[in-house]
Amino acid sequence: MFTLSKYNIAITTLAFSVWFFLFPYIVWGKTYLYIIVLIMSIITTYFYIHNKYFKIDTLLFIFLITILVFTFNLLNNASIVWSIVVSFMFLLVLLFTKDDIKNIFYKFKFIFAISLIPSMIIWILHIIGVDINIFSIGTLEAPNPLKTEAGQFYILFPGTSILNYMLDSPIIRLQGMYNEPGVVGTIAGLILVSEKMNLKNRSNIIIFIAGIMSLSLAFFITMLLYAFFTLKKNIYQVISFLLFLFVIYNFLPTTIQSQIKARTIERIELDKNFKMKGYNRENKYSNNWENWINSDTESFLFGIDYVSDGSSSWKNILIKSGYIGFFLIIIIYMLLLFINLKKINYDQFIFLFLFFLLFIQRPSIISPVYLLIFIYAAENLKPVNKTLLIPKLIIGNKNE
């Protein structure tokens, strides 16, 4: 039950502020909203923590990470205002204790789950043949230039949006209030892995179903790899679930089956160059990568003048911020590991592996969203009596 206290107000405000960094369509082009939620978070956090004691070394780590995040954003072609907003959000999250982080995460997860429900309803109505156009409340231009050039725009519904071309398909990809289904799939996958696939929780059930409905390659790869890593422990659950999916799939009309196959299995297939056919994170018509590869030493270190092409690849980090920006990401997360983990057990290793694997296609991990999930997972996936996959991953003293 929610009680009105400084603590609840602070963590709820921060959870809502972090959710904003998933960029729901209600904030597109409205940077001032981020400034407002940041100020609200600063005020509510101050009133909660102003009497608390912090160790000097902890504060130094927090301020160091804040400065590194600010520097990275500047190198990554962000404005000074945006760099301040993101770095201060990191600062605020890091000021809370690990127990506080759990409660912030639970509220964030609840907000995320609730935000998916309208899209799930529209998804079901569409698949059973209802003309969902009658529920449309307008259109919205795509913030991604790749989509705009392709003649794509968003059709808005109460609490959700759909890319216009999807309406011609017998099955749509669920994307909620966000700019693409991959956002839902990526965040859903990370949340579920950080929760050890706990499907007894109602929010997790909603997020899991929404992840499937998104037909996100990131989601399915995350789930398959997690199932593989935990097969020995969860073999009966994995087999039961795969059989369930197989039965459901075979009851679907062939038109829907072909769409599901095209958006999942066929995207994982390799072409003659051993690249996944469904890898669409780069703009093949862009010269940004070649321009960076052929640039001088300074550009190699700090990046080049980036021409926005709508792509979302790890290469963008090198193009926009060079090797310095790339290493800043490594340093930031190494510091976070040092702060939050003394030893890395098998469950935590799985999460870290999947977390950084997703970096390949969604490199914007210098975000309050990924920070919150990362710290929560480090705490929630506590060490158990298991043999470490890589013994050298142990951080700390043997007798701790």
Image: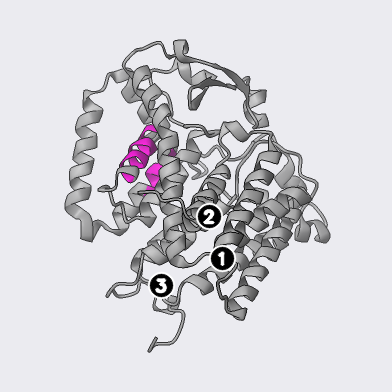
Does any portion of residue 279 appear in the rendered image? yes
Image quarter of residue 283 = top right
Q: CA distance from mark 3 to mark 1?
A: 29 Å
The x and y percentages for residue 358 are 49, 51
Q: Earlier in the sequence, mark 3 or mark 2?
A: 2
Image quarter of the C terminus: bottom left
Secondary structure of the residue carrying tag 1 is: helix
Tell me the quarter of the picture where residue 55 sits: bottom right
Q: Which of pointers 3 and 2 indicates the residue nearer the eye?
A: 2
Tell me, yes or no, whether the two marked residues, 2 and 1, touch with CB atoms within 8 Å: yes
In the structure shown, which secondary structural element does the residue marked by tag 3 occupy?
Answer: loop
Q: CA distance from mark 2 to mark 1?
A: 9 Å
Residue type at tag 2? Ala
Which mark, residue 344? 3
Q: Which residue is mark 2?
A: 10
- The residue pinned by badge 1 equals 49
Percent of width and height locating residue 206: 34, 39
Report how many numbered discs are placed on residues in the image. 3
Three-letter amino acid code at the position of disc 3: Ile
Q: Is 210 covered by the magenta stretch?
A: yes
Disc number placed over residue 131 in the picture, else none? none
Q: Main secondary structure of the magenta part?
A: helix
In this orientation, does residue 269 appear? no
Q: Residues within 10 Å of mark 2 (few under 14, many from 20)?
A: many
Q: Is residue 250 above or below residue 184?
A: above
Discs 3, 1 touching: Cβ within 8 Å? no
Q: Residue furthest front?
A: 4
